[in-house]
């Protein structure tokens, strides 16, 4: 953002939106009043804060509920209200701590869509802190993995999820054990991983597999491609590997 | 000219997210926002507070009207003091009465009892209102975890000043404004020149603001210690009443007993009288002389007020600026 932390801490505050993990609440206050107040705290004038509170609550999907007191809000509504409060002053950077925590599948989907819209349509920079790695995988393009308070690894999502083992993953209909024996007999290195077969990729591996599938009438090929990893796989391998080390 | 809106001005866009292109307000605006929001919400949510406010308003009104009515029927001829002196004493007495709890602190001589009518009840109601409104100001934030949201937008100092200002604004309406109104009403009743005693009105404003500041500081410090507003409210109110009661309960045998100094609310009133130049006054009908070298002395009163001030500041800062707060 181009600010010096020590000299411009107040300016930085004005350009950062923060939605905490817990639920900060003023129970008897309506969402509208709460978000307006948050806007005023970030330096918006009274009229501007009220107008932006209307807009932001509408944006997050709380237009109908904006005059209801916060104590009547469900977890999902409160998550949206927190997001509205974090956005009301138009920050450049938004920090969301566990934004999908406690949400049902529909609420979670809506929240993730909102987050995607924020950086795709509105150009906001977002930092999402979450234990729900599938959510992180869906909306983030850069990941920092923390374990025991230390940075374990960081990088672009696509790089982290890319398979570096050099294995080719197969899924077949038929008996994978007998098929793996046939591939081994052809000199291929094969590992069985549940319903999948992982074959060490060398020159002509794909052709050898296709020939074997063609030759065996009891087998048909369902999938052949790179082995994919989830963020959860990465997290477990990184953190566990570190702990073992 | 086309009627169809385009770009950021479309109807849908205006109800969606839009960039903020205005100018952000200064830091003072945010402090006032904290003060005003908290004050309004504290009053709005409590029916008891509203009832007490109405009761206090009528108490002050009756007291003021009574002063005028009495002054109409009193023969002011042959008094040992002038009307102007009577005005000054009566006004000072009335304002001091706003900050006298159990101990009746008065600068009026007993011979002028008709003017010795400042409602001590007002000080009780004010204290109770301060305790109710101020008790939850920080405790509720800690309970509902809103302090972190505040601190992500404003500094801890701004937060503290905002909360303090909230109680100061409240006191301004509850005691400072009535003290100004009383000045005009009493001046009207006794037919004195408004401008001759204008210093007295400024003293009234300063004194009530000082008392409001000290009491606000204490109640906020207590509120920052706990997450339960009831604990802060009750401990403040009970402590003030109990400490104020010691002098009349134990120290009655000596008029200059140092136990009087335990009454920290009363000490503010004593300091107010000293600031106005009074060298002696009556507490519960007994005379206290500030510079006779016996018992309660002027510097002691000042020390008590300063200790209260320091205690309030240190306690508030310690809890609010703690790393985990």
Image (cartoon, coloured by chain):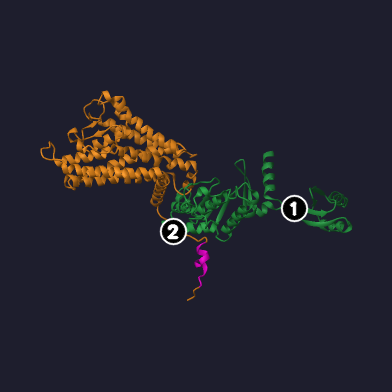
Q: CA distance from mark 2 to mark 1?
A: 52 Å
The x and y percentages for residue A158 are 67, 55
Tag of residue A227: 1
From the viewer's side, name the closer residue of A145 and A116: A116
Residue A169 visible in the picture: yes
Q: Is residue B57 above or below residue A216?
A: above
Hue used for the chain lettered A: green
Span of residues in magenta: B4-15
Chain identifier, colour orange:
B
The x and y percentages for residue B139 are 45, 40
Q: Chain of mark 1?
A: A
Q: Are marks 2 and 1 in contact (CB under 8 Å)?
A: no
Of labels 2 and 1, earlier in sequence is 2
Determine crowd level at label 2: few under 14, some 14-19, many 20+ residues with C-alpha closer than 10 A. some
Tag of residue A48: 2
What is the quadrant of residue B170 in the picture? top left
From the viewer's side, name the closer residue of B214 and B110: B110
Q: Looking at the image, which residue is at 27% across and 25% down?
A: B252
Q: Is residue A153 left or right of residue A189?
A: left
Mark 2 or 1: in front is 2
The x and y percentages for residue B260 are 29, 29
């Amino acid at each position: 953002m181009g600010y010096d932390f020590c000299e411009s801490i107040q300016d930085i505050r004005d350009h950062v939106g923060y939605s905490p993990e817990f639920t900060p609440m003023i129970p008897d206050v309506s969402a509208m009043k709460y978000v307006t107040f948050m806007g005023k705290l970030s330096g918006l004038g009274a009229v501007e804060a009220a107008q932006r509170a209307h807009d932001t609550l509408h944006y997050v999907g709380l237009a109908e509920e904006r005059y209801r007191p916060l104590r009547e809000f469900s977890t999902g509504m409160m998550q949206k209200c927190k997001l509205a409060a974090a956005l009301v002053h138009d920050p450049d950077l938004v920090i969301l701590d566990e934004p999908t925590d406690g949400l049902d599948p529909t609420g979670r989907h809506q929240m993730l869509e909102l987050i995607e819209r924020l950086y795709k349509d509105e150009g906001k920079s977002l930092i999402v802190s979450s234990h729900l790695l599938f959510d992180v995988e869906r909306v983030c393009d850069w990941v920092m993995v923390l374990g025991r308070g230390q940075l374990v690894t960081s990088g672009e999502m696509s790089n982290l999820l890319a398979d570096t083992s050099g294995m080719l993953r197969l899924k077949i209909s038929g008996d994978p054990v007998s098929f793996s024996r046939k591939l081994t007999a052809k000199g291929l290195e094969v590992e069985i991983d549940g319903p999948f077969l992982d074959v060490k990729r060398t020159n002509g591996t794909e052709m050898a597999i296709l020939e074997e599938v063609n030759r065996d009438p009891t087998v048909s090929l369902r999938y052949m491609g790179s082995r994919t990893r989830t963020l959860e796989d990465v997290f477990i391998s990184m953190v566990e590997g570190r702990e073992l080390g | 000219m086309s009627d169809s809106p385009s770009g950021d001005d479309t109807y849908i866009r205006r109800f969606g997210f839009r960039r903020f292109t205005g100018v952000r307000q200064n830091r003072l605006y945010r402090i006032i926002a904290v003060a005003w929001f908290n004050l309004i919400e504290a009053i709005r949510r409590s029916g008891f507070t509203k009832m007490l406010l109405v009761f206090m308003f009528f108490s002050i009104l009756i007291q003021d009207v009574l002063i005028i009515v009495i002054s109409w029927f009193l023969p002011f001829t042959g008094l040992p003091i002038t009307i102007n002196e009577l005005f000054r004493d009566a006004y000072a007495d009335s304002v001091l009465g706003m900050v006298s709890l159990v101990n009746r602190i008065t600068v009026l001589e007993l011979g002028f009892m008709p003017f010795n009518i400042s409602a001590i009840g007002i000080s009780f109601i004010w204290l109770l209102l301060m305790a109710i409104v101020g008790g939850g100001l920080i405790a509720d934030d800690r309970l509902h975890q809103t302090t972190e949201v505040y601190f992500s937008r404003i500094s801890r100092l701004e937060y503290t000043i905002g909360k303090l200002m909230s109680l100061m604004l409240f006191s301004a309406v509850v005691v400072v404004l009535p003290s100004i109104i009383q000045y005009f009403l009493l001046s009207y009743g006794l037919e004195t020149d408004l401008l001759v005693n204008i210093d007295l009105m400024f003293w009234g404003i300063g004194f009530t603001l000082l008392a409001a500041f000290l009491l606000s500081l204490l109640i906020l410090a207590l509120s920052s210690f706990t997450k339960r507003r009831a604990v802060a409210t009750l401990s403040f109110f009970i402590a003030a009443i109990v400490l104020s009661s010691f002098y009349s309960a134990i120290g009655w045998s000596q008029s200059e007993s140092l136990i009087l100094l335990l009454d920290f609310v009363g000490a503010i009133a004593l300091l107010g009288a000293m600031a106005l130049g009074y060298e002696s006054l009556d507490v519960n009908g007994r005379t206290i002389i500030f510079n006779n070298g016996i018992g309660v002395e002027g510097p002691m009163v000042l020390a008590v007020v300063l200790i209260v001030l320091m205690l309030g500041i240190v306690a508030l800062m310690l809890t609010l600026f703690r790393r985990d707060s």
